[in-house]
Amino acid sequence: ERMEHKVNYYLKKIGGMVGLQMPLTTYVARHTWASTMRDMGVSLSVVSKGLGHESLKTTQIYLSSIDTEGVVKANRKMIGRILRI
């Protein structure tokens, strides 16, 4: 847990450096990965496996709770900033 706290601390700093509106955390990164894969048309079973879920139903519930519009905007902003560096 201490390592996750440290990782989240640095992710939040990075998010702030690139001007993200929401704090960047491992939780946000996980959601971003899952929703991006879904939006790219990757099969639910692959997304489920990547998330470590044992049930596709769990993945469906997880993905249905994600507000993709905000995540997509944040991703675009981050990628744009990275490409300018």
Image (cartoon, grey):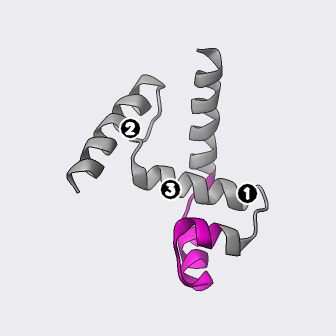
Label 3 crowd (10 A; few <14 / some 14-19 / many >=20): few
Q: Which residues are magenta?
A: 47-68
Q: CA distance from mark 1 to mark 3?
A: 14 Å
Q: Which residue is mark 3?
A: 30
Residue 65 visible in image: no
The spot of residue 51 in percent (x, y) is 54, 67
Residue lying furthest top = 85
Q: State the residue in front, 12 or 66.
A: 12
Return the residue at label 1.
Answer: 39
What's the residue type where badge 3 is placed? Arg
Per the image, label 1 sits on a secondary structure element best described as helix
Number of the front mark, 1 or 3:
3
In front here: 77 or 69?
77
Q: Mark 2 highlights which residue?
A: 11
The tag earlier along the polypeptide, 1 or 3, is 3
**CA–CA distance in space, label 1 to label 2:** 24 Å
Q: Quadrant of residue 55?
A: bottom right
In magenta stretch: residue 63:
yes
Dot 2 amino acid type: Leu
